[in-house]
Image (cartoon, helix red, strand yellow):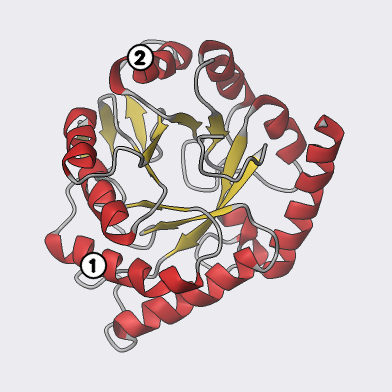
Amino acid sequence: MLGIFDGKTKVIIGMVHLDALPGTPLYNADRGIDGIIANARTDLAALQDNGIDSVMFGNENDRPYSLSAPQESVACMSAIVSALRPAIRVPFGVNYLWDPKASVAIAVATRADYVREIFTGVYASDMGLWTPDAENAARLRRNLGRPDLKFLFNVNAEFAAALDTRPIGLRARSAVFSSLADAILVSGPLTGDPVENSALREVRAAVKAVPVFANTGVNHDNVDAILSLADGCVVGTHFKVDGNTWNKVDGARVRRFMEKVERIRGGAG
């Protein structure tokens, strides 16, 4: 799948939510960048040691979110992921919320395999009017010498509502056709909120040429239904202690989830 997941089906991507970066309101200056790296290292180990297929690094703690990444955030996130890179044993991606070009720059600097972002559409959001820029993100990918870098398009943004009134299936198909999406992701309304199965089903029916992933709210109880419709999923909140987005990754929850995914894979075979 996508040529980056070692031939696996029903791929599970686990999130490494970085602590707030320097310059953001929740940044812990006492712990500094070394503290961010240390916390991310333990989450990375908890995911990899318990069977995860891939990991993605994101700046979920940089609240309130920005639609245009400050230079210091791009530099710091690149440095943090680069420091962790020797410990990464699985394919990995990055996502700077909510800036496609910053995400590409970080991915190139860290030699990531893929980027997840909102690349297309127009949204009314918590951050204001949101107009992503797929064209210049794709140009940057080419100009930086990484045409192999995969773009995972989230087509219904969290913390936002699309001003585009077309059905989600048509928007997904259009993103593949017009903006070169390598995969389509479908989200719930907020981080940790489940995807509507009807939306996932509609996108899966509309998009045939690329993989479709569930992007939020996948857990041990609903993963069977989700993977019956999707090619994989991104999991963040469910893997945390007590299922709390802001807690550390719980290795036992990861292991239990991945054991169930292996049974699903076996049944599909």
Give the residue type at disc 2: Phe
Give the vertical position of 5 relative to 94 (above or below). Answer: above
Image position of 141 (left or right of 85)? left
Image coords of residue 179 (percent x, y): 29, 22
Image position of 51 (left or right of 177)? right
> 118 or 267: nearer the eye?
267
Toward the bottom, the furthest residue is 30
Tag of residue 79 = none
Mark 2 or mark 1: which is in front? 2
Q: Residue 221 falls in which quadrant of the image?
A: top right
Q: Which residue is drawn at 25% across and 25% down?
A: 122
Q: Residue at x 24, y 69 (%)?
A: 76
Give the residue type at disc 1: Thr
Image coords of residue 161 (percent x, y): 35, 28
Q: Residue at x 19, y 70 (%)?
A: 23
Which image quarter is the C terminus in? top right
Give the vertical position of 3 relative to 165 (above or below). Answer: below
Image coords of residue 199 (percent x, y): 55, 21
Mark 2 and mark 1: Cα distance apart in space: 37 Å
N-term-proximal mark, 2 vs 1: 1
Q: Residue at x 46, y 30 (%)?
A: 183
The answer to whether any part of residue 73 appears in the image is yes
Tag of residue 177 = 2
Tag of residue 24 = 1
